[in-house]
Image (tube, rainbow, N blue to C red):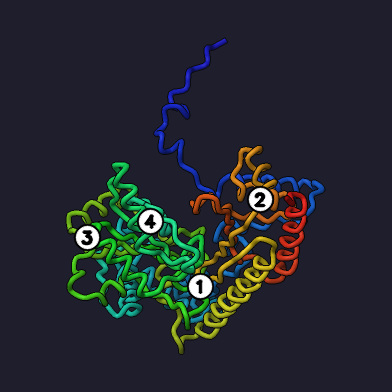
Amino acid sequence: MLPILAKILTSDNIHPFVRKAEYAVRGELAIRSEDLKIELAKGAALPFKRVVGCNIGNPQALDQKPITFFRQVASLVEYPELLKDENAEAALRLFPSDAIARAKLLLHNIGSVGAYSHSQGIPHIRENVAKFISERDGYAADPSKIFLTQGASAGVQLTLQMIVESNKSKEWGLTTEELQRSFDEASKKGVDTRALVIINPGNPTGQCLTEENMREIISFCKKNRVILLADEVYQTNIYRPEDRPFHSFKKVLKSMGPAYEGFEMISYHSISKGMIGECGRRGGYFECEGLDDSVLEQIYKISSISLCPNVQGQIMVDLMVNPPKKGDPSYEQYKKEYDDIYFSLIKRAKILEKTFNSLEGCTCNSADGAMYLFPQIRLPKKAIAAAKAAGKEPDQFYCMAMLEATGVCMVAGSGFGQVEGTAHFRSTFLPQPELFDEFCSGIKNFHASFMSKYKD
């Protein structure tokens, strides 16, 4: 019998940061939810009919319909035979004229979607992104400082991330006192803090920062010489626009005048959220503001090592920043589909907020934006003791019990970092509208049973 070769790569010799890394959104709860799906498919007798994934903002996984125009253009660039003159009549029976025109324009600038593109992203699409940013903010954007990416997360992975907990009593605003405390604490430990990541509208809390708060954050970054990384992927998920409208950090920065000239910031956007929800296509971009030219060269170098972002994701970015306009053949259908999704999200957010606030020991702020609610839960001492005995955080213990009883998968607040001694959980409000009554009833029934079981 031949000897078994000893493994070269083991969990002991891989990078220690890899071993320590945790991602609560796809952690133990998500893994267990997938096991439960398999059990249901095999006919297991469980106390629920379906598993509902509220742990991640993945709209189309919960049957959010894709925008028709976007998929039409994507189909045409994928199969350009339909655009040939001899097939023009047949194409017009299947696709509106503006979808055909957009596909032809894209292919003229791309060539084939099966070929590598420019490593920084297709120039034509970067120009459209720059135009979108300029019109949104009222300040010019430079296509040469825009990088198309495999979703916003690929862009963020190029930069140092730092998570700073925010304050629920300030409606999840981010106080400069808390920022300074965290910065100073890190400095005392010998940590050289280089960047601050802000997600706005927020994840996991669903907040939308005020302009005043954003100016404070920018001032903090300038004072402490920290680069600002602005994750703005939820910028169209705004549910109280009259009270908490979205402002980009770039717009706020530019409004602060010459004293902030050269301020270093990177802003991110994505096709995965909003009303588009094309998570699986992995499209996004980041814009660099105030970075040294030598740094931009290094970012380009690293982007080139990965060759290029996937071309279909880039195409979807183009459609996101340049959708059908009023008067276009596809506009009315696009507007209806967009609005139907938007107003449904507002309705579902309010229903779920009301549900959480009706639970014993649970309080939940309204969602200003994004796709999440982040309620705080005050668990009985017996539940906390049971969690400790099971080797789990109290909110993780609660969420696992909910999953096993209802099939609803949420994320424990401890996975994001929270004030010591508190417990939270994060839930999307993406389940299908027709399931919402059953979904909310299941949560209420579970919670009442859980609190009764562990009553002090």
Cα–Cα span, label 2 and label 4: 39 Å
Looking at the rendered structure, which numbered label has been put on residue 398?
2
Label 2 and label 1: CA atoms lie apart by: 26 Å
> Are the residues at dot 1 and dot 3 in contact (C-beta closer than 8 Å)?
no
Q: Amino acid at mark 3?
A: Leu
Q: Which residue is mark 3?
A: 291
Assign a secondary structure to mark 1: loop
Q: Quadrant of the N terminus?
A: top right
Give the mark count.
4
Q: Is the residue under label 1 in contact with that under label 2 (CB below 8 Å)?
A: no
Amino acid type at mark 2: Tyr
Within 10 Å of the Cα at label 3, are there few (<14), some (14-19), or many (20+) other Cα atoms? some
Q: Is residue 56 left or right of residue 149?
A: right
For disc 4, the marked residue is: 309
| Residue 355 image position (x, y, % from top left) | 68, 68
Label 3 element class: loop
Do the residues bearing badges 4 and 1 touch, measured as CB atoms within 8 Å?
no
Instruction: Residue 256: give x, y in percent of width and height.
Output: 25, 75
Measure the C-alpha gap from mark 4 to mark 1. 32 Å
Residue 422, above or below 31: below
Q: Residue at x 44, y 56 (%)?
A: 165
Numbered disc 4: secondary structure: loop
The residue under label 1 is 368
Instruction: Please tell me whether mark 4 or mark 1 is closer to you in this view.
Output: 1
Name the foreground residue: 121 vs 16: 16
The disc, 2 or 1, on the residue closer to the chain's N-terminal end is 1
Q: Is residue 5 depicted above or below 86 in this figure? A: above
Label 2's element? helix
Cα distance in 3D space between marks 1 and 3: 31 Å
